[in-house]
Amino acid sequence: MSSIAHVRFCQFHLCIVLLILMLSLPSRLLCQQTRQLRDKQAILSNIVHRNPQREQSNATMDKFGLPKRLQGSKPSVWNEYIGLAMKYKPLNLGQGFPDELPPSYVTDALADIAKSDNPLLQQYTRGYGHVRLVQALSKLYSNLVGREVNPLSEILVTSGAYEALYSSIMGHVDVGDEVIIIEPFFDCYEPMVKMAGGIPRFIALKPNKSNGTISSADWVLDDAELEQLFNNKTKMIILNTPHNPIGKVFHRDELERIAALCRKWNVLCLSDEVYEWMVYDDAKHIRICTLPGMWERTITIGSAGKTFSVTGWKIGWAYGPANLITNLQMVHQNSVYTCPTPIQEAVARGFELELERLGSPESYFNSLPQELKIKRNFMAKFLEDAGLKPTIPEGGYFMLADWSSLGNKIDLTSETDEYRDYKFTKWMTKNMGLQGIPPSAFYGEAHKKLGENFVRYCFIKKQENLEKAADLLKKWKS
């Protein structure tokens, strides 16, 4: 007999006993016995309805839930929108990766390395960076920043710029430290700061004009608001130039104001410069570490994925003074430890070739932005023709566009998201077959409304795909 059947059998017999007692015992004794029997029956009932396996499962889940430093984390916008793209198969102008082949000299190098008769190229390499690669990076950046960058102590090779950000934040931010984040921001900045125990402090770039053509230069910080964020608890400010998603290239006077506050409050600047070669028109990329008093308080981040259009290779780096890079090395060696040797070797050979022709028209660092400028202008026109209002980027390969004037042409009630840019981009993905990214994902909770009227598109795509996007929007408008 099962345990539950046994319990029910006992309950039945208790009811019989209770009936006999009611017929045979004095009333006062009967009441006392009845209460006792009811108590026993209640206990048995609880036994019947208990689910020991469920209680054990709940206890297990409580014990194995997210630790406090990760609580509040949720799937990123990329995980959600990659899922949408897989389901609806739209023309994807959302994710920031090229859909054309990278330069052949880079991929040919990797193929040669894979077939090499040098066995060491297939084994572990130096944990802080393959020697040939850090030497090439040292030669490049020593020239660009106007000082000798030590390849072994002032450069760390990481698993993409993503890990360079992670190692920088985890290696320098302590519990209670405040970190200033400029909005909109690449969405990993905030959770990484929180994971380190830091406190994010947000300030938003806002357009200072609403009529006519808007450039990314028109998106600016409020100087007074920025100054008020700095205090004795401020440990770091995260700068992104050229900027994702606006495309802003911070001008010298803007960088000098940030640098002055960093010097005044002894604050570290984490400068995310992965789009350093993609600058258009008269804009000039200035590395903040070259400003007076900033080398000793700046960590600069770069990316082979962005530089050579090989985002899947996941090779990035950080450079700066040895005492700052040491902290990153401690995080790196206890998490990633080392990056793939063949890929680092191939990236190194790519840089060696580019170093020979740096500044010439043949250099990929020069030819790529020329090609992207044409794509940028093409996208800006077809977005305008469709009724959107683009911000013309000075750098990078993303374009923000204000879609609010189209709000009365579409019914977004089928979408249940809180923010309108999520509703718009999901509606477009499902109904128009064109995917963008909702920029409110790049704001802190208090400022998400600032991104609701915009959509982010990527223009480092094949011309035929940009033309398909133009046709989709043209048909929609007509």
Image (spheres, helix red, strand yellow):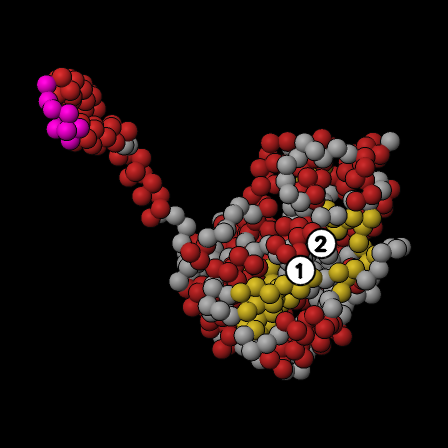
- Viewer-proximal residue among 30 and 47: 30
When asked about the image quadrant of residue 350, the answer is bottom right
Q: Kindly identify which residue carries mark 2.
A: 450
Amino acid type, label 2: Leu
The x, y position of residue 71, in whole percent, is 46, 53
Using the rendered image of the protein, determine whether residue 40 is visible from the camera's viewpoint: no
- Which mark identifies residue 183? 1
Mark 2 / mark 1, whichever is N-terminal: 1
- Viewer-proximal residue among 108 and 160: 160
Cα–Cα span, label 2 and label 1: 10 Å
The part of the chain drawn in magenta is 24-32
The x, y position of residue 84, in whole percent, is 61, 36
Tell whether label 1 touches label 2 (CB within 8 Å).
Answer: yes
The residue depicted at 79 percent of the width and 44 percent of the height is 404
The x, y position of residue 451, in whole percent, is 70, 51
Asked if the magenta segment contains residue 31, the reply would be: yes
Using the rendered image of the protein, determine whether residue 7 is visible from the camera's viewpoint: yes
| Quarter occupied by the N terminus | top left
When asked about the image quadrant of residue 260, the answer is bottom right
